[in-house]
Image (spheres, helix red, strand yellow):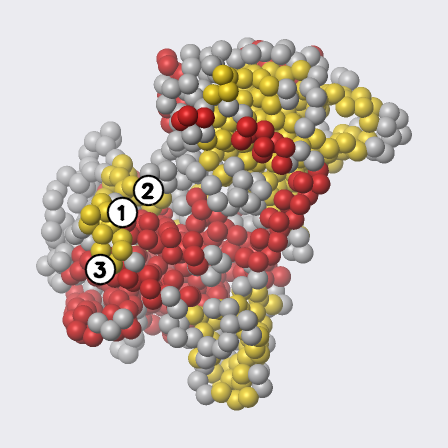
Amino acid sequence: MRFGHFDDAAREYVITNPRTPYPWINYLGNDDFFGLISHTAGGYAFCKDARFRRLTRYRYNNVPWDDGGRYFYIQDGDCVWSPGWKPVRTELDEYRCRHGMSYTIIRGVKNGIEAEALFFVPLGTWAEVHQLTLTNRSQVARAVRVFSLVEWCLWNAHDDLNNLQRNLSIGEVEIDGSAIYHKTEYRERRNHYAFYAVNAPLAGFDTDRDAFLGPYNGFDSPAAVMEGTPRNSEAHGWSPIASHCVALHLQPGEAKTLVFLLGYVENADDQKWDRPGVIHKANARALIERFATPASVAAAFQELRSFWDGLLSRYVLDSGDARLDRMVNVWNQYQCMVTFNLSRSASYFETGIGRGVGFRDSNQDVIGFVHQVPARARQRILELAATQLPDGSAYHQYQPLTKRGNSDIGGDFNDDPLWLIFSTAAYIKETGDFSILDEQVPFDNDERAARPHFEHLKRAFSHTVDNLGPHGLPLIGRADWNDCLNLNCFSTDPNESFQTTSNRAGRTAESVMIAGQFVLYGREFVELCRRSGREQEALEAQRHVDAMVASVLEHGWDGEWFLRAYDFFGNRVGSRENEEGSIFIESQGFCAMAGIGLGEGKVEQALDSVNAWLDSDVGLVLHQPAFTRYRLEYGEISSYPPGYKENAGVFCHNNPWIMIGETVLGRGDRAFEYYRKIAPAYLEDRSDVHRLEPYVYAQMVAGRDAARPGEAKNSWLTGTAAWNYYAITQFILGIRPGYDALEVNPCIPRTWNGFTVTRIFRGVTYHIEVRNPRHVSKGIRRVSLDGDPMSGNTIPMLDPGSEHRVMVELG
Ligand code: GLC
Ligand code: GLC
């Protein structure tokens, strides 16, 4: 069952039935100011940090779900309705929500009145535009009242929900013409306030929630709206809101447009006040002035669209399969950008108060967006590196506002440092910019401890070498990529977090996944040493990589697949010996991508075992058999019910590792089949089962051991986005940036006749046509550049600004 459809030309997903199985959301904003907006206009806004600078309030885990947002009420005589259906839920004559690239348009029609609201954040602006157009589609003159509503958050989203004994007394607002200012705590320690304004005179307003709603009403039936009379309330403490009431008269066929602006302002300490008690509003007024007319809104909107045209022009596929094209050209790239911007902080599953910018997560995200905004990738990589600790290890996360690492959600995840090599290599391959290696970067944000970025990579590499276990394999630490495989945790106390507890200081538990990762990214490190003239370091690093390959072959192979780990007691994890958890996906993925034992058929055997044990209709599950009881020595993984999350769910993030592994073997049919199984555009018809947005990946789909396999959770902010983009574009379609040039080496289903890709790489535009007349998966028969035959499949660097035709024939 579907709830809408893709509009590929507009790059929009169009929801036509508001009763989706879960709120289907979109993101507004591209730099500092962000909004989450659901298809019924729920959600919230923040500037820079979803925890510390939350503008509007949102209640997670609320009933009904997704209550609170940017709401419009239209009071038309006795009939009150909302263009987004919610919160009023009056049945609409027409409803449509268009989620596009950083904007959302929600349109409702009721009794001949059409209301269309456009929501977006203009580029480089600390404000959301909510432009509402009302059109009288009836034959008679109409008089309606429009009420707006946002509820202010008292800035710190965590404290806002907890510290009521204080917070119910601190709320302060100012009303100035048609602008409502939220200035809680501005008098003392804050240099910022928010405002919600409209470009029309008011028939009234409200700023006190309880006065507006009435003490026992919800957002669906505010007393002020139901009675058609704003209270002109002024909030003192309790719960401040901003609600405008605008009266409109519409002749038949007439349309009127209101521009609402939800903004954020910071003032210097000596410019906080116009006069005692009255905040300095010049900056806010200038912003309001800038977007005061529909023409200025249209210009800003056009700018946003051109911005996205540019971002999405760097890799454009024409495969003949509309679902694949819309994933590769639009939605997967879009999700990668959102994931880069938000890391794991704010979604409808991440509350914006728990996790900030994750070290491993954000390094992996780089592979999904580096071709779009390489300069920002560089900056992000250096920010991450600046939180690295002097011994090469890493804080697991940092808070975006402070950019400082903290241990709130744990540390000592021994895979963390290696991802820094991965992201840096991806950046250099995309840009050719080796100068990043010389950039001075602090350790643990201590400027006095700044060293060249290369030194950070070296310590990341050495951190593995310095922390090997009894089998010469990397110690796992608190956990590796799989946060929930906690081999040193031994937790019996439900009040402690698996992520921050390790009850045994172990130097036995080892990870075969990190071993594969070390081989893969260790080789990248060797290459970086070589290319930056560090021959001696390259040789030494290569020896460690070779030793790791030997250790994996000797101690990391279980007979038909790669082991997953050794536990605290030195027992095998992910082995035929184990009744549950006999085979895990992560080590198969990493050892396959690294080609460990490729010559001896081990990669093939491991991936065949993956197919036999882990494949299902809804994707590859993480391990099998699922854990049916809690295992103290494994930790959180066995705490999830079978089929969910890390306990044998389809953890979509790791499926592309297997896809890429299959391309190492040249098995394009299988690689693409795994791709299709989890790519959201292919799941659209099953939206009732999948439940989440059919335009973005979810972190997890319930596995075959679950009660309802195929049900997704945790959409949007997941490494799944970047890894799938990387797998499809660089390994299946096979257009891959190298240090010197672009390489073309597709591995596709045999049935394909070919495809074309336009790729802008280091300023050169390549129109690449891949032909597959012999219906093979992999292997190159001939290549031509601008009609001239070429040897090899590496396309030389040409003049920036030039355009070239590349023809690749497989066979
Ligand atoms: C979540 C985390 C990621 C981790 C994965 C597996 O996606 O964000 O860091 O690797 O779960 O546990
Ligand atoms: C929980 C989740 C896991 C996630 C981790 C991040 O353990 O189950 O998926 O990676 O939290 O802190």
Q: Residue at x 46, y 77 (%)?
A: 797
Ranked by sequence position, the earlier of labels 3 and 2 is: 2
Residue beneath disc 3: 455
Q: Residue at x 55, y 88 (%)?
A: 788
- Looking at the rendered structure, the kind of residue marked 1 is Thr
Spot occupied by residue 403 in the image (x, y as percentages of width and height): 33, 42
* Left or right: 586 as drawn, with respect to 249: left
Element at badge 2? loop
Tell me whether circle 1 and circle 2 mark residues in contact (CB < 8 Å). yes
What is the spatial separation of the Cα atoms under label 3 and label 2, in whole angstroms?
20 Å
- Looking at the rendered structure, the kind of residue marked 2 is Lys
Give the crowd class for mark 1: few <14, some 14-19, many >=20 residues within 10 Å.
many
Ranked by sequence position, the earlier of labels 3 and 1 is: 1
Residue 94 to residue 521: above or below: above
Specify the farthest residue to the right: 139
Element at badge 1? loop
Q: Residue at x 63, y 11 (%)?
A: 231
Q: Which mark is residue 387?
A: 1
Residue beneath disc 2: 403
- Looking at the rendered structure, the kind of residue marked 3 is Glu
Element at badge 3? helix
What is the spatial separation of the Cα atoms under label 3 and label 1, in whole angstroms?
14 Å
Q: Residue at x 62, y 36 (%)?
A: 290
Whether residue 794 is visible, yes or no, is yes
